[in-house]
């Protein structure tokens, strides 16, 4: 391997990665399979690709082309050298609007092409649900389709010319009429014309095998079309000329409700004569909430187009009239359509979990049958599932007869894997009996190639092998795919994971307490690899800042998987590779909500850091900022805040302190409040108690010591709404909720004074033993509150999220933790639930800013939206993460990424805000980032409403 690496480094200008991290990131795609490559090369151009092929041919090492790594059949994994086209060969070379063509490199993400084509009224027809991260090269390799294939066909229908390098270094320009055909291909076809004319199923989604029938003379002998779907086994794509289609100026979406999936499936084919753009189907099993959907147990998503909104709507209404439905909905609003489409697109992830939380896997992800036979096929498919004791929820491209499904195979035990094999063989026979294709979109890969003889017969598969030999006589390119495949139950990625649960600190309640199961959640659909967060989305800010796979949620999950496997990452929790990948995780928790399978990388990071530094010295920042509540309480008790502020304002002293504390030199140290919130509370003149509900206002560390104005404003608003406000007890005894004191003199003498804390700073730095101690002390203090029905109002979103999630998951053995978590309300939720008749002041101003990432991921912001609307605060807040993220943005080495995250959505939103807009930022980190990077003062919603009361 050393000789190979050295030769590649001499030959190519792109990056060559034979290190553990580079290899670990490419062991898997979105399939059930895993292979460990020797190394990864990111070529800069076609010359680099040619150099890699020459070196690998000399060393007898296979080459695997890879795009976004979202393949579901295993074809983007390999044991040789992986070519990563996403880093450099990712450009849109040009668009010709008149010819309706575009020239693209293989690593170009589909959405970037769509963005460039849109101003010309054009688009690329195929659009898989992974359109925000899949690449054109991968789409050509798999002959991808997407939801609009009923109108615009497959990727093969959209390809005009392909520039390809063969394994032996020939540069070919593939096209119709045998253009670019390698020597011997025409003779191979001419010798078997009868088989090519009769041996291929006639259906719109036949992707399995090689498309040799595209080389028939009556079909134009199109070598480029025949190359599509070859899964990187025939040649390496370096550039493509693709066709674009005219995009309808207006669209409407008809959502048709049916009693069940069989009814929806049988209706789909009948809608095709109406010329829809999509006919997509899914059942209620895959829908987290049916809010916004018409009545029914299954739905068809039928999109129509037109030159005007009225024309598109009229066509959609014609679809509704022609369909025999339980209920229907027609949507013309683009935002409303996007919301509904996200339900369908997220199915590729949500399908990986059954309704009871058990795991489900690909393997029979996309077989296809003639659309008119879909209903009958689904009935036979369901019967076969039942016979094998399996469960799965079909969804997908009903108009094309193509079905996606994740099935709850047991791929962890020998018996379960054996059942997986038997089921696959029997289902292949069912598909063939219905005149179908084993693959209708994602290719055969390892998942189905072994079964191709059942579909085509041995002689046609032998023809495929001869075609492979014509293109790649040395079997250098992606061997084991399509021809001479590995068994479908070999190389399963689960086989290397530990069979016994790993000893961990968090409870992982959704994964049965099993950390391995939590890591297995990531199935590789790579929604975290989008270059911009959709709408109000958050995930994944560090990937958008760096563009590095290691800094995506998927990349980190892959490294954790390899850490548990112990084959490639061999030093377990002490792994520096995993530590370095997690270092730039902001713990924003965006993946907890935005990832379709709810991977929670913030929790995994805390778990890893806990074990990684166990018994060892930690980074200085963990002590400086992890223990921030202790240092701030010390300053408050000694009343030295003015001294600390004065010293921090002396630049040389501040620089020394920051260096010793592991704090980024670019950061300013926030000023401590001269009077803490609790001290203000104790000294304030109490107004007469109202008769409203009692609420306990949580004095979080940030409100208490750094921004007590937020706490004072919240008290003013809550009391104006008629609520009785109290602070948590500060004595560990049975006290009176409201003033933190005890009626009993004996209790006073024996009680210990303390202050509640959610433990957030300890959790985010992985100091979980300390976090648990702090949380248990907090539960002791909160015991009197838990005996009442009073809610706990938390002003800082990150602290509220910690109490809602980290507390019960870290103290899963203490029932008090779940009780406290259930009491936690945000400021807006408290007003909505406990003062429903109160009318907030009419502020009547536009707003800008950002929904706190933890609020988005854990708490939700529906109550905040309603409260803002009632107060006349108009406008939407942006998504994303501010980038400061508690301790993250303050740590040395994180400043550039932190600032880049702020520039992604927050700072542009503030710059583009209308005059007089209120900058809302409920989190202390968000307000600090705005102040330090933009010189803008952000305010908590409580402060804005309190000012309105005046």
Image: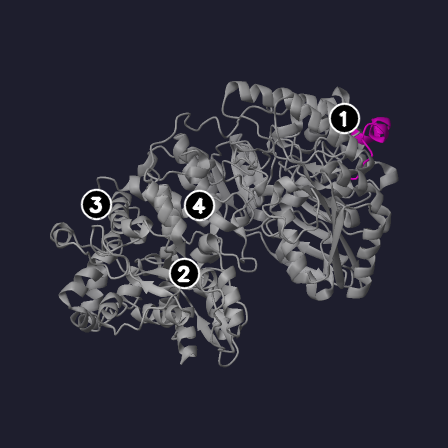
Q: Secondary structure at mark 4?
A: loop
The numbered mark, 4 or 3, whose residue comes first in the sequence reads 4
Pointer 1 residue: 432
Left or right side of 276 for 589: left
The numbered mark, 4 or 1, whose residue comes first in the sequence reads 1
Whether residue 2 is visible to the viewer of this picture, yes or no, is: no
Q: Quadrant of the C terminus?
A: bottom left
**Foreground disc of the pair 4, 1:** 4
Q: Residue furthest right?
A: 218
Pointer 3 residue: 617
Q: Secondary structure at mark 2?
A: loop
Spatial CA distance of label 4 from label 1 is 40 Å
Spatial CA distance of label 1 from label 2 is 52 Å
**Foreground disc of the pair 2, 4:** 4
The numbered mark, 3 or 2, whose residue comes first in the sequence reads 3
| Residue 820 placement (x, y as % from top left) | 35, 49
Spatial CA distance of label 4 from label 3 is 26 Å
Membership of 525 in magenta stretch = no
Q: Secondary structure at mark 3?
A: loop
Q: Which residues are magenta?
A: 188-204
Pointer 4 residue: 600
Can you tell which quarter of the image residue 674 is in? Answer: bottom left
Left or right side of 684 for 589: right
Left or right side of 10 for 815: left
* Count of numbered labels shown in the rendering: 4
Pointer 2 residue: 883
Q: Secondary structure at mark 1?
A: helix
The numbered mark, 3 or 1, whose residue comes first in the sequence reads 1
Give the residue drawn at x 77%, y 50%.
152
User: 474 or 502: nearer the eye?
Assistant: 502
């Amino acid at each position: 391997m050393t000789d190979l690496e050295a030769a590649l480094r001499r030959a190519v200008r792109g990056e060559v990665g034979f290190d553990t991290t580079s290899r670990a990131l490419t062991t898997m795609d979105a399939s059930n399979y895993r292979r460990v490559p020797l190394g990864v090369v990111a070529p800069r151009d076609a010359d680099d690709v040619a150099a890699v092929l020459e070196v690998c041919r000399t060393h007898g090492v296979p080459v695997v082309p890879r795009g976004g790594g979202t393949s579901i059949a295993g074809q983007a994994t390999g044991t040789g050298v992986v070519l990563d086209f996403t880093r450099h060969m990712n450009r849109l070379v040009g668009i010709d609007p008149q010819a309706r063509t575009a020239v693209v490199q293989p690593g170009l993400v589909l959405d970037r092409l769509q963005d460039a084509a849109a101003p010309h009224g054009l688009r690329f027809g195929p659009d898989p649900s992974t359109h925000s991260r899949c690449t054109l090269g991968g789409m050509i390799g798999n002959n991808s389709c997407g939801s609009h294939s009923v109108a615009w066909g497959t990727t093969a229908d959209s390809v005009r010319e392909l520039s390809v390098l063969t394994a032996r270094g020939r540069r070919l320009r593939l096209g119709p009429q045998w253009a670019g055909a390698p020597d011997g291909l025409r003779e191979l076809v001419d010798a078997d014309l009868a088989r090519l004319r009769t041996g291929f199923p006639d259906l719109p989604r036949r992707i399995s095998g090689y498309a040799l029938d595209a080389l028939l003379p009556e079909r134009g002998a199109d070598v480029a079309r025949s190359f599509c779907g070859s899964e990187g086994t025939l040649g390496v794509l370096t550039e493509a000329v693709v066709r674009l289609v005219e995009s309808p100026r207006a669209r409407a979406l008809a959502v048709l409700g049916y009693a069940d999936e069989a009814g929806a499936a049988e209706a789909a084919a009948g809608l095709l004569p109406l010329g829809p753009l999509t006919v997509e189907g899914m059942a209620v099993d895959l829908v987290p909430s049916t809010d916004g959907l018409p009545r029914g147990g299954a739905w068809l998503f039928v999109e129509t187009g037109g030159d005007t909104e009225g024309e598109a709507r009229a066509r959609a209404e014609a679809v509704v009239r022609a369909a025999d439905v339980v209920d229907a909905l027609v949507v013309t609003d683009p935002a409303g359509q996007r919301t509904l489409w996200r339900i369908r697109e997220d199915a590729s992830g949500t399908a990986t979990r059954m309704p009871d939380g058990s795991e489900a896997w690909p393997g029979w992800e996309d077989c296809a049958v003639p659309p008119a036979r879909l209903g009958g096929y689904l009935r036979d498919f369901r019967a076969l599932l039942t016979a094998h004791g399996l469960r799965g929820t079909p969804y997908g491209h009903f108009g094309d007869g193509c079905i996606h499904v994740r099935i709850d195979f047991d791929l962890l035990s020998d018996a379960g894997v054996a059942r997986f094999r038997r089921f696959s063989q029997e289902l292949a026979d069912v598909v063939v009996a219905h005149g179908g294709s084993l693959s209708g979109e994602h290719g055969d890969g390892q998942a189905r190639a072994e079964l191709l003889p059942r579909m085509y017969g041995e002689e046609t598969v032998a023809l495929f092998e001869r075609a492979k030999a014509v293109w790649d006589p040395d079997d250098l390119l992606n061997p084991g795919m399509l021809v001479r495949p590995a068994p479908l139950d070999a190389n399963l990625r689960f086989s290397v994971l530990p069979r016994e649960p790993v000893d961990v600190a968090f409870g992982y309640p959704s994964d049965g307490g099993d950390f391995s199961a939590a890591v297995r959640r990531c199935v590789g659909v790579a929604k975290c690899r989008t270059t911009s967060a959709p709408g109000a989305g958050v995930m994944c800010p560090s990937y958008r800042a760096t563009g590095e796979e290691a800094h995506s949620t998927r990349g980190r999950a892959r490294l954790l998987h390899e850490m548990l496997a112990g084959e490639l990452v061999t030093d377990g929790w002490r792994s520096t590779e995993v530590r370095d990948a997690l270092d730039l995780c902001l713990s924003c928790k965006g993946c907890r909500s935005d990832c379709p399978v709810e991977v929670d990388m913030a929790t995994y990071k805390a778990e890893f850091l806990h074990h990684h530094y166990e018994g060892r010295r930690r980074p200085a920042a963990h002590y400086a900022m992890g223990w921030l509540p202790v240092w701030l309480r010390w300053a408050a008790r000694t009343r030295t805040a003015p001294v600390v502020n004065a010293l921090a304002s002396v630049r040389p002293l501040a620089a020394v302190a920051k260096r010793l504390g592991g704090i980024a030199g670019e950061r300013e140290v926030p000023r401590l409040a001269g009077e803490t919130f609790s001290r203000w509370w104790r000294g304030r003149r109490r107004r007469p108690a109202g008769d409203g509900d009692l609420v306990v206002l949580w004095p979080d560390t940030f409100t208490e010591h750094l921004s007590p104005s937020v706490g004072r404003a919240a008290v003013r608003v809550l009391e104006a709404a008629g609520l009785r406000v109290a602070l948590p007890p500060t004595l560990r005894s049975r006290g009176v909720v409201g003033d933190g004191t005890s009626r009993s003199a004996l209790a006073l003498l024996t009680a210990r004074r303390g202050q509640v804390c959610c433990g957030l700073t300890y959790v985010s730095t992985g100091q979980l033993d300390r976090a648990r101690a702090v949380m248990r002390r907090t539960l002791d203090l909160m015991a009197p509150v838990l005996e009442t029905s009073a809610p706990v109002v938390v002003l800082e979103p990150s602290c509220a999220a910690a109490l809602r999630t980290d507390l019960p998951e870290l103290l899963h053995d203490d029932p008090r933790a779940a009780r406290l978590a259930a009491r936690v309300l945000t400021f807006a939720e408290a007003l909505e639930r406990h003062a429903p008749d109160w009318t907030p002041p009419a502020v009547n101003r536009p707003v800008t800013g950002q929904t706190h990432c933890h609020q988005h991921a854990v708490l939700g912001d529906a109550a905040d939206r309603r409260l803002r609307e009632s107060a006349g605060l108009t406008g939407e807040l942006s998504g994303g993460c501010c980038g400061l993220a508690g301790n993250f943005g303050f740590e040395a080495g994180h400043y550039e990424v932190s600032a880049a995250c702020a520039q992604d959505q927050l700072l542009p939103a503030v710059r583009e805000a209308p005059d007089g807009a209120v900058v809302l930022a409920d989190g202390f980190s968000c307000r600090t980032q705005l102040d330090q990077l933009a010189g803008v003062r952000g305010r908590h919603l409580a402060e804005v409403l309190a000012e309105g009361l005046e």
